[in-house]
Image (cartoon, rainbow, N blue to C red):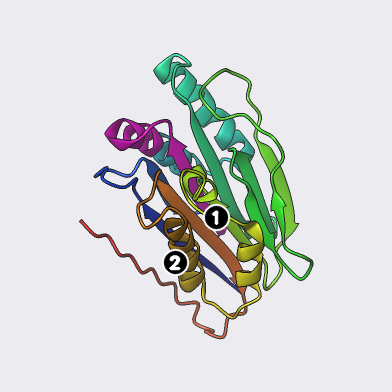
Amino acid sequence: MEVEVGVAKVGKYAVRVCGDSVEVVERPCGGVSVVLVDGQGHGRAAKRTSHMIATKAANLIEDGARDGAVMRVVNDHLYAFRDGQVSATATILTADLDHDCLVVSRNSNSPVVVGSRNKPHCVDSPVEPIGVRRLIKPAITHYDLMEGTTLIGFTDGVIHAGRYGGTQTFDYKWVYAQLNKDSSVHDLTGKILDYAIDLDGGKPKDDMAVAVMRITRRDDLLGIRRMWISYPY
């Protein structure tokens, strides 16, 4: 089997720096994690916050920490660093080969869409953002590591698209419908981001980031690993 990951993001319209950060990290005992962080506000200040949290989380994962522990540490780190005055939302999507499971960890107001052999659904239990107080717990959900399972994480700029002056708002049923189509992870990620941008009239009202993780069948017996990046500037 194979873990496929796609990431797409865009900054708020007319703001040069995107305040959302995404890190993809290989787990030391096998597997991949995607860290998705939305810093409070916009621009460089938000980017500094989200980048600090995302890289801290990635380093902890590289050191072998479990996702729940990672979320607690980055919460305490942000709280101590900014005296509880700055918040951020964080989501970690993990394919854990050591324990043969998928893990969704959230301290975010944005749900995670899960598509599998069963009906697609949202993981949206209420949780607090990180950084505002100590002893904040993440919401953690486990799934079997099964072929065809897809996890989709967002920052709130995506799910709030269309709320401010648009004629339509973000519809999870549209996302569910895309899961039924034979789209690659790369195409699915782009479609979701394009959909959110269109809802905002082509001018994103907030920073937007989408991360997709899918388990697929692997035909390559050599186990070749690939990465493709596009970084406009």
Residue 36 within the segment the image draws in magenta: yes
Please tell me whether residue 221 is drawn above or below residue 73 in the rendered image: below
**Residue positioned 43% across, 40% down in the render:** 54
Asked whether, in this view, residue 68 is left or right of residue 5, the answer is right
Asked if residue 220 is positioned above or below residue 209 in the image, the reply reads below
Q: Nearer the viewer, residue 70 or 205?
A: 205
Lateral position of residue 230 relative to residue 195, left or right:
left
Numbered range of the magenta stretch: 27-52
Estimate how packed mark 2 is, as few (under 14), some (14 to 19) or many (20 or more) residues with alpha carbons within 10 Å. some
Q: Position of residue 32 (x, y in %)?
A: 53, 57
Residue 231, disc: none
Q: Is residue 62 visible?
A: no
**Percent position of residue 34, x then y:** 50, 52
Left or right side of 219 for 117: right
Q: Which residue is mark 1?
A: 168
Closer to the camera, 210 or 103?
A: 210
Residue drawn at (72%, 67%), measured in percent from left and top? 116
Q: What residue does disc 2 label?
A: 190
CA gap, disc 1 to disc 2? 19 Å
Q: Residue at x 69, y 55 (%)?
A: 99
Residue extending farthest top = 83
Under tag 1, what secondary structure?
A: loop
